[in-house]
Image: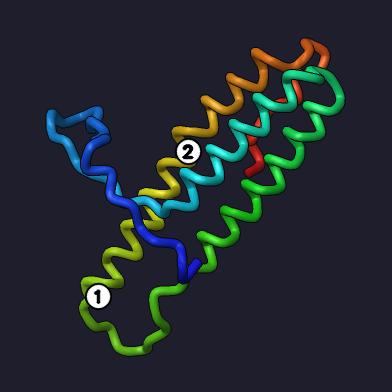
């Protein structure tokens, strides 16, 4: 949201597949916080349940991610009818949205792996974020 500060990942640079260049990503701090909270919840829940309760926690994760994606989609740069160059702040906002979306896209599979390694086999095949 508006109070969500961008976080530069200057120390954690991601290598491009097609090029030998490094490009820092800007992401919203909230993305890191959301995934850290989900990972913590997963670890805590796994200490007492790897069945239905853990599956319900996963279902909550899905709702959280759906809402987070909706929030990112609703970040507006500015409404305008005349095409003008973007300001530095608008460019930064767009970079944060793209960087955060990429972060979520690369982090979700790791979360799915963690859940499927932990959850009872009978639930594992239903652990997916495909719709989100």
Name the residue rendered at 62%, 46% in the picture.
65
Coordinates of residue 113 in the picture (x, y in percent): 58, 19
Residue indicated by mark 1 = 86
In-front residue for pair 27/128: 27
In this view, which residue lies farthest toward the left?
20
Above or below, comparing residue 111 to residue 104 in the picture: above
Q: Check residue 105 in the rendering and tell me which mark sits there, or answer none.
A: 2
108 to the left or right of 13 = right
Mark 1: which secondary structure? loop
Mark 2: which secondary structure? helix
Q: In which quarter of the image is residue 130?
A: top right
Above or below, comparing residue 110 to residue 8 in the picture: above
Q: Which of marks 2 and 1 is nearer the N terminus?
A: 1
Q: Quadrant of residue 79?
A: bottom left
Above or below, comparing residue 122 to residue 26 in the picture: above
In-front residue for pair 18/78: 78
Name the residue rendered at 59%, 40% in the picture.
37
104 to the left or right of 120 = left
Q: Distance between the residues labelled 2 and 1?
A: 26 Å
Quarter placement of the C terminus: top right
Above or below, comparing residue 117 to residue 42 in the picture: above
Q: Quadrant of residue 17?
A: top left
Query: For mark 1, does the 10 Å Cα neighbourhood hold few (<14), some (14 to 19), or many (20 or more) residues?
Result: few
97 to the left or right of 64 = left
Name the residue rendered at 48%, 38% in the picture.
105
């Amino acid at each position: 949201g508006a109070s969500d500060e961008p976080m530069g990942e200057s120390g954690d640079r991601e290598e491009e597949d097609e090029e030998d260049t490094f490009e820092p990503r800007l992401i919203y701090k909230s993305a890191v916080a959301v995934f850290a909270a989900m990972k913590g919840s997963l670890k805590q829940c796994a200490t007492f349940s790897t069945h239905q309760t853990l599956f319900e926690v996963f279902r909550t994760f899905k709702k959280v991610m759906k809402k987070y994606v909706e929030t990112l989609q609703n970040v507006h740069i500015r409404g305008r009818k005349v095409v003008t160059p973007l300001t530095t702040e608008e460019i930064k906002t767009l970079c944060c949205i793209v960087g955060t979306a990429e972060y979520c896209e690369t982090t979700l599979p790791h979360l799915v792996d963690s859940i499927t390694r932990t959850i009872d086999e009978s639930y594992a095949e239903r652990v997916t974020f495909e719709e989100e």
